[in-house]
Amino acid sequence: MRPALSLLASLLCVTSLVGHAQDRPAASIHGFVPARLDAQRALEARFDAQVSTANLKAWLTQLAGRPHHAGSPHGKANVDFMARLLRDWGYQVEITQYDVLFPTPTLRRLELVAPTTFSARLAEPALAEDALSKLQAEALPTFNMYSIDGDVTGDLVYVNYGVPADYEALERRGIDVRGKIVIARYGGSWRGIKPKVAAEHGAIGCLIYSDPRDDGYGQGDVYPKGGYRNEHSAQRGSVSDMPVYPGDPLTPGVAAKGGVTRPEFTKAQTLTKIPVLPISYADARPLLEALGGPMAPAAWRGGLPIPYHVGPGPARVRLQLAFDWKLVPAYNVIATLPGREFPDQWVVRGNHHDGWVAGATDPVSGMVAVLEEARVIGQLARTGWTPRRTLVFAAWDAEEPGLLGSTEWVEDVADTLRAKVVAYVNSDSNARGFFDAGGSHSLERLVNEIARDVPDPKVKGSVADRLLARTILQGSADERRLARDQRHFEIDALGSGSDYTPFLQHLGIASLNIGFGGEGEYGQYHSAYDSVDHYLRFQDPDLAYAAALAKVGGRAVLRLSEADLLPFDFTRSADRIGRYVDELGDLVKTLDSDTREHNTRLAEGAFTLAANPAETWIAPKKKDDVPEFDLEPLRQAVERLRVAARRFETAAQTTSDVPASALTAANAIVFQAERTLTRPEGLPRRPWFRHQVYAPGFYTGYGVKTLPAVREALEQRAWDEARAQIPIVAQTLERYAGEIERAASVLAR
C-alpha cells in the first residue's frame, strides 16, 4: 500500500501545482528592466495571437509532400519555396550552396549462403494507407551513408547493441569476430559507433537491424494499424565517425565550396572502415535463426520469436555494397531581419529541412514551427516594431548525412559568427507530449521562464507545469525537490545529433535545442513511412504542439533580441559544472573500487570456478591499478566560478539603475563568455571539437560527455592523459570565471 499512497500524494501535489498555475501573477522576465516588462509581454501576446495551425499544416504538406534528401529535386523546390516566403515576410534572404560528399548505393545485396540460403528484401513496401510510400522511385533506398564499398563473405556473429562492453562479453565466451560479419541491433549507442567498434575488433562487415522489442511490435501496434515500425521497415542513417568531426567528410574545418582541395574519398577520416547496411527485422530473422553457438545472455534477447544465439556460424552471409561517391549541392536558406539598436549582435534560430525520405516528423514538424515564428515576427515588423538585435532564421540542408549544411556555413563564416552571435536556438523533430530542452546551462533560467509562460495546448497549466508534474512523478529525489521547492527544471547537456553542434562545440556559441515529444508513436524514424499520413495520425494530429513550439521558440528569439541585459544566468552554469567535477571524483572512486574487486575476484579464481563447465569461458585479464588524481585545480576553478556567478547575479538585479552604456558593455562580454570554454587545440585526438565542457562521446556518438577531455581519459584508463588534462580544463574554467567577473564589474560601476 505504501507505493500507492506515495503516488497519490504526488498526484495531489501535481494537481495543486497545475491548478494554481493560471492564478499566478505575471512574473518578471530575466534581463528586462521593470519599465519594459509590460511592453515585452504585450509583444509576446501579439505574437501568440497570430500563430496559425492552418499555416503549419499547409507547410507540413508542402515540405514533406515528396522525398527531399540533399540534392533531390523536391529538396531544391523546398529551398526556393521557403526563400520566397521569407522574402515576402520582409527578410533579407540568401541561399548558400556547398558541394558535399553524398554517395548513394549502386549495389546493395545481402544473402545467407549457409547453412541455408536467403536473399534479403531490402525494401519498404508501398502501403495503401500511406500516399508517400508509393513514391519509391524518388526515395533513397535503405542504406547507411558513408559506409565504404565492399564485397565480403563471412560467418555471422550476433553482438547485441555492438558497443564495447558487448565485445568484452563475447571475449569472455571465447568468441572472436575477426574475419567475421557482425549483426547488431539498433539502440544502446548512436548507429555510427557500431561499425566503428566492429572494425576495431577485426570484423569485415556490419549489419544493423531494428529489433521489434526496441522498435516495433514490442512498443505497440505497427504501421499502418499503429505508429510503430513494421517488419519491413528499416532505419536509414549516417554512420560517419561524427565524434571526430561532423560536416562534409572531405573538407574538415573549411567550407566545401569553390576551389577547396578535396582528397580522394577513400582518404576521408570519417568513413567507415568496413561495409555496413541497415536491415528490417523481417530480413534479420532468417539470419538470426540460422545462428548456432551459445545462447545470448538474457539481456541480449530481443522480441523476435526465436532463440537468440550469438554464433559464430553456422550462419554465413555475403554482403555486397557499392556507391556512386558523388558530390551534391547542399542549400541553406539564411533569412535576416536587421536589428535597430545592435545590428552586430545576432540571434540565430534554425532547423534542418532535408529528410531521409519525406521526413514529416524528422525534421519538417520542427521546421514548420520555425517558419511560423519567422512569419509572425515579420508581421510584427510590418506594424512598426523592429528587433533590437538582428534576427537570423536558418533552414539547413544535408543535416541527415552528418550536419553538413550547418557545419559548412559555420566553417565558412566562423569569424563573423564568433564576433556577432549572441545565441543559437535549434529545433529538430517535434510531436505531442512534454517540453524538452537541452543546451548551455547559462540559458537554463531563460528556458524555464519561457516554458512557464506558454500554455500547454492539451492540459490546464503551462508546458513547464506539465514537465514539472512528470518530474515529480518520475524524477530523482533532487529533481523532485527542485521541481517542488523552486518550480524549476534542469535542461540537458548537449552531445551531438543536430545542428547546434558546430555553433556550440566548435565556436563556443551558447546554444539551445528545444522541442516537444514523448506521447506520439514514433516508430517510423528514418523510414519511408515518416510521412504526412503517419504524422497526422500518430504524432501531432492537430499540430497543437507545433504551435506550442512556435510560441516557445518565438519567445526565445524575442527575449534574446529585446533584453536590456542578455538573459544569461551563470549561477546555473556554475552549479552544473561543479556537479560535473564532483562526478569526476565519483568516477575515480568507482574505477578504483571496481578495479580492486575485479582483481581480487581474479586472484580468488572466482571467474573460473563460477563458470558453467559445459560452456566456454575465458577469465578476464587483470586490470591496472587506478592511480590517485588531484582534482583540486578543478574544484578551485569551480569555486571561483560560483563566486563570480553570484557577483554577476547581484549586479544584474539592479539593471534599472545601470546606465545604457554599461549595459551595452556588459552584454558584449556576456554573450562572448561561452567562447572562453573552448580551446583552439580542441579535445585530444579530435581538434574540431573545442568545447571543454560539452562534447559527444567518442563511443556514444550523440550522447554527451561532460568535461570530456578528463572524463573520457579516465573511462579509457588513459591515466597520464587524464592527469595532463586536469590543469588544462581548470584553466579553461578560470578564464570563464574571469569573463563573468569582468561583466559583473562593468554592471557595478
Image (cartoon, rainbow, N blue to C red):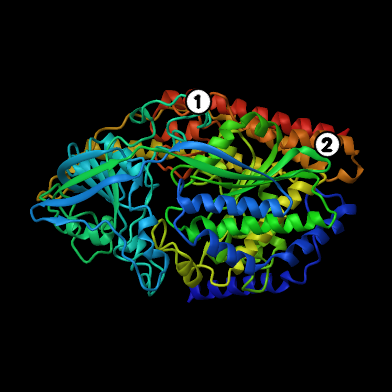
> How many numbered discs sit on the rendered protein?
2
Q: Residue at x 54, y 62 (%)?
A: 62
Residue 247 in view in this figure = no
Is 36 positioned to the left or the right of 675 in the image?
A: right
* Lower sequence index among marks 1 and 2: 1
Where residue 637 appears, x then y in whole percent? 64, 30
**Between residues 288 and 613, which one lies in front from this camera angle?**
288
Kind of residue at disc 1: Gly
- Asked if residue 733 is positioned above or below residue 153 in the image, the reply reads above
Task: Please name the residue that numbered disc 1 is placed on.
Answer: 259
Q: Residue at x 43, y 23 (%)?
A: 720
Quadrant of residue 206 within the rendered picture: top left
Crowd rating for badge 1 (residues with CA inside 10 Å; few <14, some 14–19, many 20+): few
Is 100 positioned to the left or the right of 548 in the image?
A: left
Quadrant of residue 548 within the rendered picture: bottom right
Residue 664: mark = 2
Kind of residue at disc 2: Thr
